[in-house]
């Protein structure tokens, strides 16, 4: 169910953004990546684990760096970061002990990340969004 929810919600958000025109701006998917990168930090705070907050902050900083690189240089970095975050979701429980993470979250987030990455790659390949910053 988590995987299906990730697929459906990622498609709904992406298609809504396309319908409204939000994804025409180069900042849309980098902003999505910032939000995605912040959730594990939120869960760490909710779980009351200072160590998890610190560990998640390190990872979040890496993804924020990828966000800046993608926005300032080329959106293909954002595609790569979304896929990488999906991989991170897969291994998260083995890398960081975070008591606030819901058991279903890694599967949902992995699926959302990959679907969002594929959709952004589709937009870039079909020149619906400009990859390179001007």
Image (tube, rainbow, N blue to C red):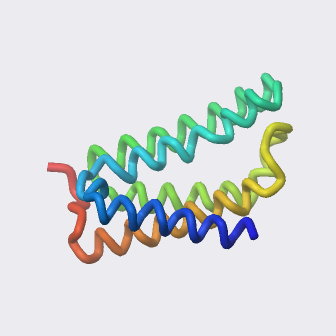
Which of these two is toward me, 92 or 1?
1
- Residue 41, percent across and down? 66, 34
- Residue 87, percent across and down? 65, 61
Residue 7 picture quarter: bottom right
- Residue 57, percent across and down? 63, 31
| Name of the residue lying farthest toward the left | 134
Which of these two is toward me, 125 or 35?
35
Give me the residue at 75% from left, 51% from top.
92
- Residue 79, percent across and down? 43, 61
Labels in figure, total:
0
User: Can you say whether 23 is above or below 56 in the image?
Assistant: below
Give me the residue at 48% from left, 39% from top.
64
In the displayed structure image, the side of residue 108 where residue 50 appears, left or right: right
User: Can you say whether 74 is above or below 72 in the image?
Assistant: below
Give me the residue at 20% from left, 50% from top.
133
What is the quadrant of the N terminus in the image? Answer: bottom right
In the displayed structure image, the side of residue 61 where residue 79 appears, left or right: left
Give me the residue at 48% from left, 48% from top.
33
């Amino acid at each position: 169910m988590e995987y299906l929810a990730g697929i459906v919600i990622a498609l709904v958000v992406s298609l809504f953004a396309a319908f409204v025109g939000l994804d025409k701006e180069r900042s849309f998917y980098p902003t999505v990546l910032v939000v995605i990168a912040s959730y594990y930090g939120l869960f760490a705070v909710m779980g009351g684990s200072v160590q998890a907050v610190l560990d998640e902050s390190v990872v979040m900083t890496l993804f924020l760096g990828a966000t800046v690189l993608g926005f300032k240089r080329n959106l293909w970095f954002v595609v790569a970061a979304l896929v990488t975050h999906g991989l991170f979701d897969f291994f998260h429980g083995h890398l960081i002990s975070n008591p606030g993470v819901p058991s279903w979250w890694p599967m949902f987030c992995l699926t959302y990340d990959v679907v969002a990455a594929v959709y952004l790659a589709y937009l870039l390949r079909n020149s619906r969004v400009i990859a390179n910053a001007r």
